[in-house]
Amino acid sequence: MVPAKQLLSTIESTLLGPSPPTPAQRIELMHAIHNSFSSFQSLLSYPPPKPSDRAQVQSKQVRLPDSSPISLDDQDVHIALKLSDDLYLNEIDCVSLIVSANQEWGLLGREPLEILRLASGLWYTERRNLLTALYTLLRAVVLDQGLEVDLVSDIQKYLEDLISAGLRQRLISLIKELNREEPAGQGGPHSELYVLDSRGALVERRAVVCRERLIIGHCLVLSILVVRISPKDVKDIFSELKDTAAELSGTAATLKQQITFSLLFSLVISFVSDALSAVPDKASILSCDVSFRHEFQEIVIAHGNDPNVEGFVDCIRLAWAVHLMLLQDGTVSSALSTDLKNICACLEVIFTNNVFQFLLDRILRSAAYHNDDEDMVYMYNAYLHKLITCFLSHPLARDKVKEAKDKAMSVLSPYRSGSHDRVHEGNLNSQQAIEPASLPFVSLLEFVSEIYQEPELLAGNDVLWTFVNFAGEDHTSFQTLVAFLKMLSTLASSQEGASRVFDMLQSRTFRSVGWSTLFECLSIYEEKFKRSLQAAGAMLPEIQEGDAKALVGYLTVLQKVMEHGNPIERKNWFPDIEPFFKLLSYENVPPYLKGALRNTITTFIQVSPIFKDTIWSYLEQYDLPVVVGTNIGNSSQPMAAQIYDMRFELNEIEARRERYPSTLSFLNLLNALIAEERDVSDRGRRFIYDDVFGPFQQRAYADPYEKWQLIVACLQHFQMMLSMYDIKDEDIDSVFDQSQLSAVAQSAQLQMQLPVVELMKDFMSGKTVFRNIMSILTRGVNAIITERTTQVYGQLLEKAVQLSLEILILVFEKDVIVSDFWRPLYQPLDIILSQDHNQIVAFLEYVRYDFRPQIQQCSIRIMSILSSRMVELVQLLLKSNAANCLIEDYAACLELRSEECQIIENSREDSGILIMQLLIDNISRPAPNLTQLLLKFDLDTPIERTVLQPRFHYSCLKVILDMLDQYIKPDVNALLHEFGFQLLYELCLDPVTSGPTMDLLSSKKYHFFVKHLVTVGVAPLPKRNNTQALRISSLHQRAWLLKLLATELHACDISGSLHREACQSILAHIFGKDIIEDGIHSSTLQNGDEDSGAGSMSKSKVLELLEVVRFKSPDTYPKFSEAVRNLKYVSLVEGIIGNPTTSEKGGIYYYSERGDRLIDLASFRDKLWQKFNLISPQLGSFASEAELGEVRETIQHLLRWGWKYNKNLEEQAAQLHMLTGWSQIVEVTVSRRMSSFPNRSEILFQVLDVSLSTSASPDCSMKMAVILTQVALTCMAKLRDERFLCPIGLDSDSFTFLDMLMMKQLPNGACHSILFKLIMAILRQESSEALRRRQYALLLSYFQYSQNMVDPDVPTSVLKSLLLSEQEGEDLDLQKIHKEQAELARANFSIFRKEAQAVLDVVIKDATQGSESGKTVSLFVLDALICIDHDRFILNQLQSRGFLRSCFIRISNFSSQDGGRSLDSLQRACTLEAELVLLLRISHKYGKLGAQVLFSMGVLEHTSSCKAVNIHVKGSLMRVETKLGRDVAMDIDRQRMIVAPILRIVLSLTSLVDTSEFFEVKNKIVREVIDFVKGHQLLFDQILRENIPKAEDLTLEEINLVVGILCKIWPYEESDEYGFVQGLFGMMCALFPRDSENQRKSELKVFQLCFSLSSYLYFLVTKKFLRLQVSDVSTGYNVQQQPTLALLGSLLNSVTATLERACEEKSLLLNKIQDMNELSRQEVDEIISMCSRKECVSSSDNIQKRRYIAMMEMCQVAGNKDQLITLLLPLAENVLNILLIHLQDEETVEMITHGAKSDLEQDLPWLCGKLVPILERLELLSEDKTGHNLKVFRRLVNSLKELAIQNLAL
């Protein structure tokens, strides 16, 4: 058995959906209804209470079906037994109800009474769903809903079987049973009176049961049209009808009346359909049973005492008579048969009791009838049409009608003169008062008028038109004539009927009835009034009542004829409309006749534009004057004479009679005229404002219907004023305080003001119109609902409420414009409303009004406006105790919208969308805000601490979550689902609501994230052809869902199990991998098998999600299609399309609820008509139909194009939106949650590969390519970072260095694929610089990844030592790695070479013509290409294309302005840096050849011309003068970007200097470098004077560069006028005696500097024969300072100490790396802490990851130590050689020993004594620890040691 809720959902989605049901839906439907056959057969029949079950419940142990035993407490037992007693339900089923209620609502913490009501409500909801399902099935068969024939046939066969199985008998008995005062019906005397419905609202049980009875009654009516009724059922229904009708006496309960109507029409339809379905071979079911016919005749003819019951029985008598008539052969024999006697008997009673009047008064004109189900009312009318048609076609009935007509003519007098005060002058559409003699013929005519409101019923109805001809003849009474004319007006409600009626009256079909009679009568009275006015003292003649009523009847017919006539033909029907105006100004013309005249005039406005101006002129000529303004002040002088104007007629004539037809018609006419033009003059505005609407509450009204007609007309007038007129600047300035003005001036001022200004002033000061509108709205939504359903004027009252709310919205839109200028006299509307909080609450509660969606929408819009203006709105609602009701009302409105079955095309008219937008807009507003209130956040505590309980509290949050969870009707609710996901995303993004929302969505109750990945994320995308709107929304839904998942992955705290498990689930479902997180292995959520490689990833949803958006974007360029372009007027449209402004500002565009800029088709259409009218003014009035047709066709083509443009633009935006969501979830996962996966490189490669493939596709738009390239960048960056991540997947904690090496690199094939696809992406046809910048960055990242697999800071010697210590033969592994690297490099170049020309074209173009940032990254790409160059291919290309020459030119043209502090100058400096880096790369890559190329192209000349170096010097001076950190930072950046690269280039050129050419004075390279140095003396001096101990790394590098240049080329300079030699010597004296223990952080750079200086000193000693003193003995100031041998000894001591320490530390590190797997966690943590890498690990990381991080850090430190050792050994060799030269040179030794005197005699032995211990320490250095061959080094040490010992002996 299918649950009723699921059954109803299946039926509605299949039968009521916006598109035809699919085969799968049909199969599901038939399966569901067949499984529910027994439920329908025994409708609402449930197991009764049983003593055994009651005892089981009382035992507190209950076993439910398909469930394990459950335990109950005392409260559960009490509630279950109470439910059983109240509902007459089995006790076990009551326990099931409580369990279901707990699952639906959460009962923990609720009161017992609330639980009882919730469970009861759940039971009644289940019953209602079942009844609605049955009703929907019956409607599908009976009503034409456009379903497929075979589907309807299958359902009909099913229903026939169901009815044959006793369903109809069950329906009849249910109507009776549910009306009883017992538990199984409306409830016993001790039953609970109320239940809580599915929305948590308290509902009276009786009302629920009564509604069930009504649905059952409707089902009964429909069932009769499926299977004909049996005689027994007829008698049962008739009996129940009399019982039900008896209950209506003295009550006006709408539902009870509608139930009675259903029973009545069940019999009417039964009799008519049974008789009409009789054919010769298939007799009537009822006629076959003779006993039934006799018995029922006696029953139906019997008279009763209750007049109300008798009225309904009379209706059955009429239907029974028609049934008998239809069964006759249509001839009347002389001998009346039994049936004829029965017919005559019924007819006699029918006409005697005037059943037609009863049908009119008690049924057709009742509020209950009009408020019944529209389809049922239509069916009732259709069978009344069949009934009256059959009735009028039978001879007996015709004779009876003729008899009634003759009687009416004889009884009623032809005319009655006198006062019209006693005459009914009301609206003919209202319920009329009973005439003095209510005769059957008159009632019959009115009855026919009432039932033929639907034009479809008139088609081909010859019987009716025959009756019209009969009824129109020989009228001697105005009552019958008026009734006949009213019938004609109804028959003229269609185009065919209007033409037929016009011809009938035009051709004088009737002797006394025709158009000529109308105009003759108008002319006669007009002449009488004229003659009376011309005669002195004569009284105006009275218009006879009969004439007046007849004229009204004629005019009503004329109105209908003109409204519905053929648009072309009707223009010529009544060319002269002046007669309708001539009687308007006369006092003796009855107001209701004036009303009819004006209403007739109103119909001509739409006939032709020509009539509009004619009407205005005739009104000014004939109609009553309208006095403008009010009586101001207390004038004591009375008016000389009373003017008979509109005000007088209203106040003195109509007000006394309490009827206002003239005023009402005037308002309608004025509104219709104003709607057609913008008229700024006052034509009744003040009259409406002051006299009609102002005092409407004080007036008396004979007919409430007319009262609300009047109010609606006033409100429509105000609405037009506010919507049609804009407030200009001059209007704002013209408003001032009028209290100082005289009465005359005030009146003049009022006349000058625009209507909208006056209305705005009224609302912004709380005056008359505002107060009256508030009086309408503050009646309360409940009172409006009651009157709407119980009163005839209910629909007018409803319209008044809607207009009032719309007027408030219009005022809200305009008051912001003027409020700042009009204060303090006038305040914004929200300020006025806030003076009485009850007003605000009153119209916010109209969201509960579900009879008219427009009212709900207005209430929601006002709530949105107030929430943006009133910060205290939520507090106001809480204090007024309206908050909880509003929460439930908004949830109910949203839920009701989600249950709709038809798509609402305009989302701005969708209540659900408005609510969702309201919630989204208020999320970011200060707490407590409206979103938090409506979603039931706890406003009594900090919002962040709220524990959301949507199942406990009925709110919008519950509705949204259920709607998304069930995901029903995805086509109808597409936008609701989309905004639901957006709302949840925004809630998770907001810092206040994110915590509670993410906790709720992560809970196991919802499984929200993972579930919707399947139901929404990877579901097939709807096709574009027929469901483009659904396709667009589906893309947006996926986008918001993915962004929501990304937010959860990014922001959640995984320290808690709730979010950790949610993240694991998300990652497992998206990437299809097992998750290892904190030692927890989660494989239960894995998709597919655990295969490695592409097989596993092929099932990954991350690729499926990308596949969803991999389609070609629809065309969104504003170009017309070929069909549109060929049209005549298309060239005129380009100006309209090109205007970018919105429709509010005169353009044609608007921004949708998603933020898309779309064409407003209505504004577009209006602009097109304006354009065409300007070009062809004759189109308005004198154009031919062909010209108009051509224009219309053109506009239709353009509108279709605009619609398609909008949809395509929306689809492209949706595609980008989803791709953005996909990119976010990928990037968040890659950057933050990647550690959870094994084989990370494989996953990254798959995503990277598919991103590049998609971006290179021609179907991929440029915007998509940008997003995909960004994803690829992230993946490539993560691949590069893999060396710093601990690999996962090892089975033990053991981890070796070889493991680290072998697990890092992607296979070469994968790298080849990446490069190839990246090149294809760069060469894509549609591209942009922004896209290429990202692609270039990706290319650079790829080259960096592919060039070095191992950390370059770890030298090969360290690698070898680590590998050899682990395993034998690892040299082969290292060689294999290097070989693979070399193969990859060659393959990279080979792949690039195939597309080299095209790639270089693009890159060089960007490097020369792009923006500064584009040039910079392009230059870096060229730099990277040079790195992989073979055979100087790139270099040759750059030279042949002239690119290098252009680089030199740009470098030399770098001006001083480019060195400013703006962003542009900084970007230009970056470009310069990239150009310098490129040149340096050429020199480095190609060695001396590259340097020679640069030198030959004049690199020194161009760099010398660059102003960058001067900027550096100026910037340094500025840095001394300023204390601003920003300036210092910019100078340092400029130093890094410009000065250092230039110095590197100059240093690279010194490699061309050959020492063999030392004595070659003409060495060009040396000369030019020396000239460069001389040209930048200030720069070199400044750098040399830097304080080395305090210098930063960048400064040390520059010092190294300067010293390197000088040391290389300055020896060739003969003179030292620049002082560089002394500067170098001074630096030696400062650096050589350094302490090796200090400045260990920068010791590598300092020792590099020492090495350069020592090389320079060695060069001077060897080439220029410089000889040094042992120590400094100079005392004069002018003696140049030179280094001494003692300084060299100190340097050698420092080098030795550093060497020893570096060797020991390196050896210790290598040993620790080898023993890493034996170290404890504490020791590993100490290593990590020592390396300052605590941030790389968390407390939850396991020992394996910690060992990996420690190993990586120690390898890097060991590499640094090895690099230091490699530098110190040649430095020591230089020092040793210098010392050795001095000690070997006999002249030097002799000079030292014999030339010096006194204290210096002991210097050399002292020096040698210092050297011997140092040399002995150097001898102890081992090759194992240093990692270098020390054979030559030791020989040098031994030689120096021997000489030192010898000198000690001297």
Image (cartoon, rainbow, N blue to C red):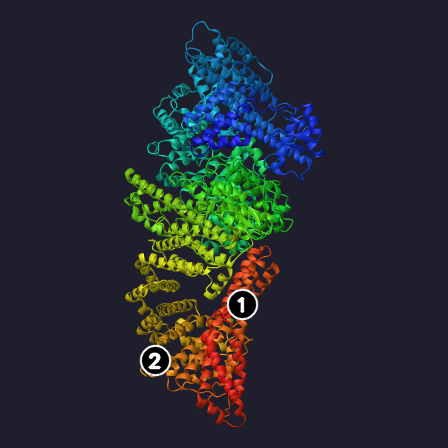
| Quarter location, residue 189 | top right
Q: Position of residue 1768 (x, y in %)?
A: 48, 74
Q: Classify 10 Å Cα crowding around label 2: few (below 14), some (14-19), many (20 and above).
A: few
| Quarter location, residue 1415 | bottom left
Instruction: Identify which residue is drawn at 49% across, 56% down.
Output: 1299
1148 or 1414: nearer the viewer: 1414
Q: Is residue 98 left or right of residue 1015?
A: right
Amino acid type for the residue under numbered disc 2: Ser
**Residue 1636 visible in the snapshot:** yes
Residue 1694 position (above or below residue 1170): below
Q: Position of residue 414 (x, y in %)?
A: 46, 21
Pair 2/1: label in front: 1
1396 or 410: nearer the viewer: 1396
- Label 2: state its secondary structure: helix
Residue marked by disc 1: 1707
Residue marked by disc 2: 1556
